[in-house]
Image (cartoon, rainbow, N blue to C red):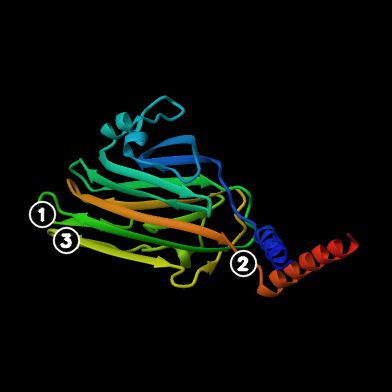
Amino acid sequence: MKLSVLLSGASMGALLLGSATVSAAPVTLQVCNGTCWTGNYTIADAVVVNWTNVETMTNTNGVSVDTWETTHGLNVNGWSLSMDSDPFVTNNFTITNTTDLTQTYTLGTTVGVSPAIPNGLMRGSIGFSLTDNNYNGATLATSGASIYQGTIDNNLLPPARKLWDSPISFSTFSTTASSTGFGFPTREAAPESIDTNIGILITFSLTPGDSVSFTSNFDVIPVPVPAAVWLFGSGLLGLFGLSRRKRR
């Protein structure tokens, strides 16, 4: 009898809490420098897409990332996207400015969410390592937008939840690193329901010949059902099981 009640209560809790499961998620990858290369794909849940995969991907015009980057002043040395059913998305990459001028780049990842999350709790973070490759000083800076911008249903998070907002810059004559985040240790309420996707946009300027590596993440979970509701559901199901047993 007790085992029956516990199992029923767990089932009820899972139903009340809900979960965002992504068995096959639509994914958008984007890299920009003046113009943008954008690719749309479908990938399996809990998968990692790394640079070996990305390099051969083509956009709707049939252009691969590898071909596009050679004509747009950058070398993406490594890029990986990981996602899971929380939903959870990362946007990690290393990029080198191969031109003689400071350039502005945007690299973005967007992952589909299903089912929708009407009320979510979110957190996000970003870190970087900046390297001066030519020993004349390297600078990473904002370029009209926050370096980190999380998105929900293609809408940017409110300004207070963007990270490294403009204007800000980091400089070094060797290497330097920094990181920041929000929603730690306690997650924050999402500003809107999550109906279709979440994503990360990383926009920055980088001095000539220099490299920067980014790690970033953004994830959302459903707001937990209050304990009283959980216990009430468990109790109802337990009484229902007891009633059926007595009738038998």
Which three-letter amino acid code belongs to the residue tagged 3? Thr
Residue 223, numbered label: none
What is the x, y in percent for residue 178?
A: 27, 64
Question: Which corner quadrant holds the N terminus?
Answer: bottom right
What is the x, y in percent for residue 131?
A: 18, 54
Is residue 144 at least partly visible in the picture?
no
Secondary structure beneath disc 2?
A: loop
Q: Nearer the viewer, mark 2 or mark 3?
A: 2
Q: Report the front residue among 244 and 103.
A: 244
Q: Nearer the viewer, mark 1 or mark 3?
A: 3
Residue 172, numbered label: 3
Q: Which residue is mark 1?
A: 136
**Residue 122 horizontal side relative to residue 133, left or right:** right
Asked whether the residues under the numbered discs 2 and 3 touch, taking CB atoms below 8 Å apart as contact, a structural biologist would say no
Secondary structure beneath disc 3?
A: strand
At x 31% / y 29%, what residue is drawn?
Answer: 67
Q: CA distance from mark 1 to mark 3?
A: 9 Å
At x 24% / y 57%, what residue is drawn?
Answer: 129
Q: Report the front residue among 1 and 13.
A: 1
N-terminal-most mark, 2 or 3 = 3
Which three-letter amino acid code belongs to the residue tagged 2? Pro
**Disc 3 crowd, CA 10 A, few/some/many (<14, 14-19, 20+):** some
Quarter of image, res 76: top left
**Residue 164 horizontal side relative to residue 27, left or right:** left
Q: Which residue is mark 2?
A: 224
**Residue 118 horizontal side relative to residue 158, left or right:** right
N-terminal-most mark, 1 or 3 = 1
Q: CA distance from mark 2 to mark 3?
A: 44 Å
Q: Report the front residue among 184 and 160.
A: 184
Is residue 47 at least partly visible in the picture?
yes
Asked whether the residues under the numbered discs 2 and 1 touch, taking CB atoms below 8 Å apart as contact, a structural biologist would say no
What is the x, y in percent for residue 244?
A: 85, 61
